[in-house]
């Protein structure tokens, strides 16, 4: 990002925070965030918010699904003000329990409706697309699959890695249940297991394994490869955005919601910051996710988010079948 653009963004962000401060009560100088986004990814952004707002932010990091379960257990007495999650399924779980405040219309307005809760209980702040990452020295471009449904054939036996315990993978399975039904989803999972699909703990280990020649391909989120390139330069792995409008090309937001027992003014200020031009540019340039607010460009080389053949699905509904998705992954023998 050039210096002029960065300067404009910083000034705009500072003005936004300054305006927001006038709406705060001024009596609550501490904000507690439960973050399903890793410290490595978002700590610099949170530190920037602290510097600009004057608020102290206490962050509890963890897996999004685990933090959602913790919030459900804590209920309205949760010490958290904001839940910042990596997937809509975890956010929907908290929303479905009635533990999120409804966000103001003017706060959610900059984000397209498909990336926020239908009742404005949470909002997406950055986007990630499911992709097929592959070793271009082992797979030719004309062999690339149009959807995940092709990966159960003998051609792909033992070649496509999965991350069965990963939250994004489970959200993908939940989306597949909604789109294709439980029977078809279980059949796909069982076929992948029978096909000897290698399993890993997360997306980044899969991308590293593909790049190292350990496995030919994998199903992951798009930005992990860009992180690897940013850290190490030349790689053998390539992202393929599949053409089919199936769960395999799902675009999911990371997002946030305000807990019913949380401080409303400071929490709203934090979410407004996440949607500011400054933070949206951070997601694009530093974490390589898609900005969701119009006017901020994605990382160079990524296809426009509107060009991705993602299925038309109500992301709020993922939470309704997330437990069932976990059950089917276990039933298929992948856990």
Image: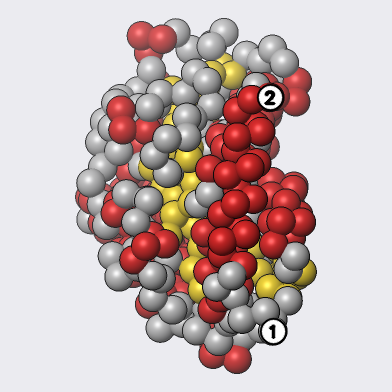
Whether residue 227 is visible: yes
Which sits earlier in the primary sequence, circle 1 or circle 2? 2
Q: Position of residue 302 (x, y in %)?
A: 47, 24
**Relative to 190, is 238 above or below?**
above
Instruction: Name which residue lies at 75% across and 20% down.
Output: 232
Q: Quarter-wise, where is residue 17 in the image?
A: bottom right
Relative horizontal placement of residue 198, taking residue 302 as reference (left or right): right
The residue to which callout 2 is attached is: 3
User: Mark 1, residues whose alpha carbon is within 10 Å: few (<14), some, or many (≥20)?
Assistant: few
Instruction: Name which residue lies at 25% across and 36% down.
Output: 245
Q: Position of residue 113 (x, y in %)?
A: 29, 54
Residue in front for this viewpoint, 313 or 276: 276
Marks counted in the figure total: 2
Instruction: Name which residue lies at 37% across and 13% down.
Output: 143
The residue to which callout 1 is attached is: 27
Disc number placed over residue 106 in the picture, else none: none
Mark 2 element type: helix
Residue in front for this viewpoint, 300 or 294: 294
**Relative to 224, is 44 above or below?**
below
């Amino acid at each position: 990002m050039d210096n002029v653009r960065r300067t404009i963004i910083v000034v705009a962000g500072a003005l936004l925070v300054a305006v927001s401060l006038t709406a705060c009560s001024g009596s609550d100088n501490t904000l507690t965030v439960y973050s399903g986004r890793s410290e490595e990814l978002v700590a610099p952004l949170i530190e920037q918010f602290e510097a600009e707002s004057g608020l102290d932010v206490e962050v509890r990091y963890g897996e999004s699904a685990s933090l959602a379960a913790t919030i459900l257990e804590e209920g309205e007495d949760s010490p958290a003000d904001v839940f910042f999650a990596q997937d809509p399924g975890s956010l929907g779980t908290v929303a479905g329990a009635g533990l999120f405040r409804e966000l103001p219309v003017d706060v959610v307005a900059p984000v397209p409706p498909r990336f926020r809760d239908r009742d404005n209980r949470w909002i997406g702040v950055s986007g990630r697309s499911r992709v097929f990452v592959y070793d271009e020295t082992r797979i030719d471009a004309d062999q690339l699959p149009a959807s995940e449904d092709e990966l159960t054939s003998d051609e792909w036996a033992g070649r496509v890695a999965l991350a069965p315990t990963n939250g994004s993978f489970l959200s993908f399975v939940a989306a597949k249940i909604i789109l294709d039904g439980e029977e078809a989803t279980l059949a796909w999972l069982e076929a992948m297991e029978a096909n000897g699909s290698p399993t890993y703990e997360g997306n980044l280990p899969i991308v590293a394994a593909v790049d190292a020649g350990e496995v030919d391909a994998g199903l992951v989120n798009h930005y992990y490869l860009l992180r690897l390139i940013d850290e190490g330069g030349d790689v053998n792995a390539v992202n393929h955005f599949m053409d089919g409008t199936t769960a395999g090309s799902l675009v999911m937001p990371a997002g946030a919601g305000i807990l019913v027992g949380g401080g409303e003014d400071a929490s709203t200020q934090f979410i407004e910051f996440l949607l500011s031009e400054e933070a949206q540019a951070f997601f694009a340039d530093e974490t390589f996710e898609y900005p969701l607010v119009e006017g901020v460009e994605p990382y160079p080389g990524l296809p426009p988010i509107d060009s991705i053949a993602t299925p038309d699905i109500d992301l709020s509904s993922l939470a309704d079948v997330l437990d069932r998705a976990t059950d089917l992954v276990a039933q298929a023998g992948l856990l």
